[in-house]
């Protein structure tokens, strides 16, 4: 059995997680939450669901669109955490979708041979590979937090898999799309 080239496979999987799976799960979580809970914080130093969505959009833009893609970095990271309201679920999701869409355009045009190229992001030297790996794992972590909040506020409202015959079949994928590369 032959193996697939890792560079293109890594880019394809990264695009899938950042452009399909995680945003779909975040959208389901955010849409299931009561509107008065989007900006709820358990304590003054914790982040609300709204803050996490803003933070993910800022992170993806800074690391992928700017850091990897070369666009100007205009991120105001502190503002992502300072906001305490004003955006509803659909506004938050539209903002996140725009960032993810722009990042996907960068990744779609990226030559796998540049994964080892150096970039300076947030004042740190890193490779394109490491930057993208960071963004995917960072997105995954905050997706989990958003799912936990949604399940806390609306038990049973978000279900991502159909457990038929012991198999977890994804419910969040567009018709005809597979989650396996």
Image (cartoon, rainbow, N blue to C red):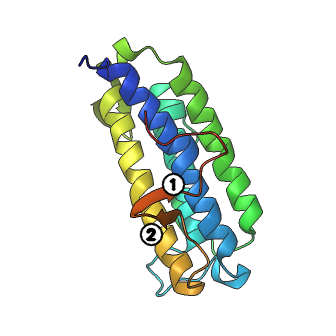
Q: Quadrant of residue 100?
A: top right
| Residue drawn where x is 60% and y is 49% of the image | 173
179 vs 108, nearest the viewer: 179
Please indicate whether residue 88 sits to the left or right of residue 13 in the image.
Answer: right
**Quarter-of-image position of residue 154:** bottom right
Residue 16: which numbered mark, if any? none
* Residue 75 shows in this picture: no
Q: Secondary structure at mark 1?
A: helix
Where residue 85 appears, x then y in whole percent?
69, 74
Percent position (x, y) of residue 94? 73, 52
The mark nearer the N terminus, 2 or 1, is 1
Quarter where residue 115 is shown: top left
Q: Classify mark 2: helix, strand or loop.
A: helix
The residue that label 2 is drawn on is: 145
* Classed neighbour count for the residue bearing mark 1: other residues with Cα under 10 Å, few (<14), some (14–19), many (≥20): few
Frontmost residue, 2 versus 57: 2
**Quick one: label 2, few (<14), some, or many (20+) residues within 10 Å?**
some
Foreground of the two, 9 or 43: 9
Residue at the spot x=54%, y=36% of the render? 73
Q: Is residue 174 above or below residue 112?
A: below
Please state which of residues 136 and 167 is positioned toward the viewer in this rendering: 167
The C terminus sits in image quarter: top left
Report, in whole angstroms, how far the alpha carbon at label 2 lies from the one at label 1: 19 Å
Quarter the N terminus occupies: top left
Find the residue positioned furthest to the left.
1
- Identify residue for label 1: 77
Residue 158 place in picture, x, y as percent: 58, 72
On screen, residue 97 above or below 116: below
Viewer-nearest of discs 2 and 1: 2
Q: Is residue 24 left or right of residue 120?
A: right
């Amino acid at each position: 059995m032959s193996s697939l080239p890792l560079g293109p496979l890594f880019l394809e999987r990264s695009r899938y997680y950042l452009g399909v799976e995680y945003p779909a799960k975040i959208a389901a979580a955010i849409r299931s939450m009561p509107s008065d809970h989007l900006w709820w914080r358990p304590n003054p130093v914790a982040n609300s669901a709204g803050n996490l969505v803003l933070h993910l959009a800022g992170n993806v833009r800074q690391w992928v669109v700017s850091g990897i893609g070369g666009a100007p970095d205009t991120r105001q990271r502190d503002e992502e955490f300072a906001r305490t309201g004003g955006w509803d679920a659909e506004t938050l999701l539209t903002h996140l979708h725009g960032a993810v869409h722009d990042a996907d355009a960068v990744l779609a045009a990226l030559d796998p041979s540049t994964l080892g190229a150096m970039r300076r992001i947030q004042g740190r030297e890193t490779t394109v590979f490491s930057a993208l790996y960071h963004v995917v794992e960072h997105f995954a972590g905050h997706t989990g937090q958003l799912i936990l909040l949604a399940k806390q506020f609306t038990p049973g409202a978000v279900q991502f898999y159909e457990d038929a015959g012991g198999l977890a079949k994804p419910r969040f994928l567009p018709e005809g799309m597979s989650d396996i590369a």
